[in-house]
Image: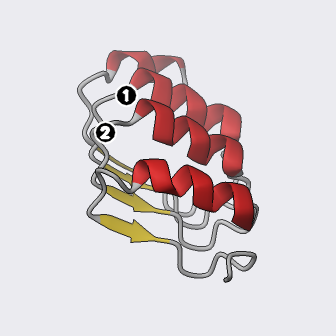
Amino acid sequence: MKKIENCRDLQSLSLHGCHGITDIGIIQIVNACPMLHSLDLSKCRHITNVTVKKIAEECLQLKSLILQECYELVKNIFIIDLSEICLNSHTLNIAGCRDIND
């Protein structure tokens, strides 16, 4: 992950299906890439609300966030964090996130 520090202008990143990545790795990426417009974390099954909160705080340019089948997200805290992200986002995909309901 050390090389990611050189990617400050990165605007789009897909980690779709990177089953081994955790909050620690995503937070390093988010800290290093504040210009992200599109982030796909589909099927990153170890991503938690910690990551969503960090994305909301750091990725102010984010327009598209895909969290499809991120099973570790907890509904109540997650929705609060998403309200911060949704102010700027155009696309949000949370399909298959089992614990998110009304």
- Quarter holding the C terminus is bottom right
At 69% from the left edge and 41% from the top edge, which residue is drawn?
Answer: 50
- Residue 9 horizontal side relative to residue 19, left or right: left
Is residue 89 shown to the viewer in this render? yes
Whether the residues at callouts 1 and 2 have beta carbons within 8 Å, the answer is yes
Give x and y (percent) for residue 45: 70, 61
Quarter of the figure with residue 5: top left
Give x and y (percent) for residue 83: 48, 55
At 70% from the left edge and 55% from the top edge, which residue is drawn?
Answer: 77
For the residues labelled 1 and 2, the Cα–Cα distance comes to 6 Å
Give x and y (percent) for residue 72: 76, 61
**Which label was assigned to residue 36?**
2
- Residue 26 horizontal side relative to residue 36, left or right: right
Q: Amino acid at mark 1?
A: Cys
Q: How is the image coloured?
A: secondary structure
- Circle 1 residues within 10 Å: few <14, some 14–19, many ≥20: many
